[in-house]
Image: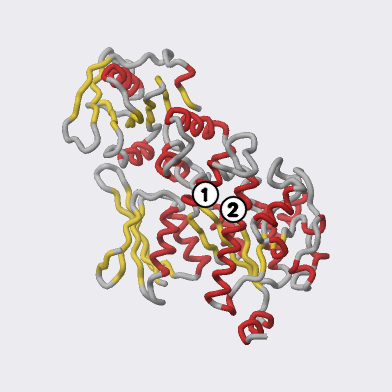
């Protein structure tokens, strides 16, 4: 996990469902309440899974975005507040 | 009685549910919630869960979602997703109670998952006395599955997992001996069910009663080890290596692409669409790989120890899965792991109908 603009950043690119969620759980467990984690994923399933996981576990998904590179690989980015 | 035990005794009872994402575990949780008991779910990732990987890779119109997460949303409960894939190998490779129809060690699988749940329960007790769990629930139904849910297996599973008296199966509890939560009055046994056998109608009616309209397909469809095609590929992997073992990458790659074995000493894994191509790209530093040059087409990994003649054949097959498959000659590039140099083959694409059926693993 690295740090960017004061937020923790975790790169889960290349991981497939449900590993991004499992890694997200582990990373968030290490943060204090109200801290923000930015997680990068390439699995399209995270578009559904991460909002659902935040919903059931009481964390706040404060923002999400996506960007595609010239090889057609899309990266999904989520900002989650514990 | 120590103070912490007093706290335990006086606080509301809580249950930990094995939540597969199927209808039965969804109903089991709701039945217990209806009795005023707080429930949290746990979902175990074995590496063979149908939820992941290929669904995530392939572009389909189907809604992609994690079924257990969706169940938890519907139920309004917390969900812990736990990776047990490494420890689960022992269950797959050496099941005490053997396999089902395919490579599915269902009885050992259930015992293992319940053991894991009990460990979680014990850990929660140690960590925060007031937030512990008092018992475990599952969506098992006697006689619904041909192996793990036989009535004679139910006590064995409870005993071997050491969950015994704290394992409650709300859908068929009235056909089993009362468990601790029932005997102590935490749960009203009269409000539990006596479902039996493979008939799904009672569960579907109960789902309607609870207002559940959208739920995953019946149990058994959530594990690749019950899938005929997948297990054939797994058996082929073990046979070709001369030993029954696997790494996570092995079992993930069995879910990706077409698998073609022209000879015992090498196998081809060919992407079927863009998502799989992107995914297999990540393996090019570990496998020999081929792709048609100057035209679109599949990415192909080569697993094993091919000879130069084998590589020429592999190039022909790669060309057959390119956009130039009807051209007389196609250029195919071979990339070796950690080698920047590309070896180019000029080949005639393999004939569309020339592929021997026994080469295709499906």
Query: Which callout, 2 or 1, points at the residue further toward the start of the chain?
Result: 1
In the displayed structure, would residue B215 be above or below residue B136? Answer: above
Judging by the rendered image, the residue that carries numbered circle 2 is B112
User: How was this image coloured?
Assistant: secondary structure
Structural crowding at the residue carrying mark 1, measured as other residues with C-alpha within 10 Å and reported as few (<14), some (14–19) or many (≥20): some
Residue ID at (29%, 38%): B286
Residue ID at (62%, 57%): B114
In the displayed structure, would residue B190 be above or below residue B253? Answer: below
For this view, does B30 lie left or right of residue B86? Answer: right
Of residue B347 and residue A61, the one placed in the foreground of this image is B347
Question: Residue B309 at x, y = what percent?
Answer: 28, 16
Residue ID at (54%, 43%): B92
Judging by the rendered image, the residue that carries numbered circle 1 is B88
The residues tagged by marks 2 and 1 sit, at their Cα atoms, a distance apart of 8 Å
Task: Name the secondary structure under disc 1.
Answer: helix
For this view, does B57 lie left or right of residue B209? Answer: left
Q: Quadrant of residue B279?
A: top left
Tell me the subunit letter for badge 1.
B
In the displayed structure, would residue B348 be above or below residue B81? Answer: above
Question: Residue B49 at x, y = what percent?
Answer: 52, 46
Residue ID at (68%, 63%): B30
Question: Residue A41 at x, y = what percent?
Answer: 36, 54
Residue contact at pointers 2 and 1, CB within 8 angstroms: yes
Tell me the subunit letter for badge 2.
B
Of residue B242 and residue B64, the one placed in the foreground of this image is B242
Of residue B362 and residue B184, the one placed in the foreground of this image is B184
Of residue B303 and residue B187, the one placed in the foreground of this image is B303
């Amino acid at each position: 996990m690295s740090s960017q603009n004061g937020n923790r950043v975790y790169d889960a690119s290349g991981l497939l469902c449900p590993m991004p969620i499992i890694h997200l759980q582990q990373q968030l467990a290490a943060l204090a309440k109200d801290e923000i984690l930015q997680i990068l994923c390439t699995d399209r399933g995270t578009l559904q899974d991460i909002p659902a996981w935040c919903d059931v576990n009481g964390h706040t998904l404060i923002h999400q975005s996506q960007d595609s590179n010239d090889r057609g690989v899309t990266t999904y980015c989520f900002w989650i507040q514990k | 009685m120590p103070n912490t035990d007093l706290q335990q005794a006086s606080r509301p009872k809580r249950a930990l549910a094995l939540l597969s994402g199927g209808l039965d575990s969804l109903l089991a949780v709701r039945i217990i919630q209806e009795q005023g008991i707080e429930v949290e779910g746990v979902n175990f990732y074995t590496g063979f869960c149908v939820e992941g990987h290929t669904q995530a890779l392939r572009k389909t119109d189907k809604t992609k979602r994690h079924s257990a997460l969706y169940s938890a949303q519907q139920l309004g409960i917390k969900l812990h997703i736990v990776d047990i894939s490494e420890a689960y190998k022992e269950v797959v490779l050496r099941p005490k109670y053997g396999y089902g129809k395919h490579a599915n060690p269902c009885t050992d699988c259930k015992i293992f998952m319940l053991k894991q749940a009990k460990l979680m329960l014990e850990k929660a007790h140690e960590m925060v006395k007031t937030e512990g769990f008092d018992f475990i629930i599952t969506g098992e139904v006697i006689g619904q599955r041909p192996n793990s849910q036989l009535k004679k297996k139910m006590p064995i599973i409870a005993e071997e997992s050491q969950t015994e008296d704290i394992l409650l199966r709300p859908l068929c509890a009235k056909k089993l001996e009362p468990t601790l939560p029932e005997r102590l009055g935490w749960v009203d046994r009269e409000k539990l069910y006596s479902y039996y056998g493979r008939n799904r109608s009672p569960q579907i009616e109960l789902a309607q009663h609870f207002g559940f309209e959208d739920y995953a397909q019946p149990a058994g469809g959530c594990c690749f080890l019950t899938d005929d095609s997948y297990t054939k590929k797994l058996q082929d992997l073990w046979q070709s290596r001369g030993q029954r073992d696997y790494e996570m990458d092995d079992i993930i790659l069995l879910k990706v692409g077409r698998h073609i074995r022209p000879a015992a000493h090498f196998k081809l894994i060919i992407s079927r669409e863009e998502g799989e191509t992107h995914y297999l790209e990540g393996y090019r530093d570990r496998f020999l790989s081929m792709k048609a040059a100057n035209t679109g087409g599949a990415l192909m990994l080569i697993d094993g120890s091919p000879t130069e003649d084998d590589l020429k054949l592999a190039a022909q097959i790669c060309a057959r899965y390119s956009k130039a498959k009807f051209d007389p000659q196609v250029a195919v590039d071979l990339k070796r792991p950690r080698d920047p140099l590309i070896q180019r083959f000029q080949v005639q694409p393999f004939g569309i109908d020339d592929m021997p059926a026994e080469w295709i693993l499906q």
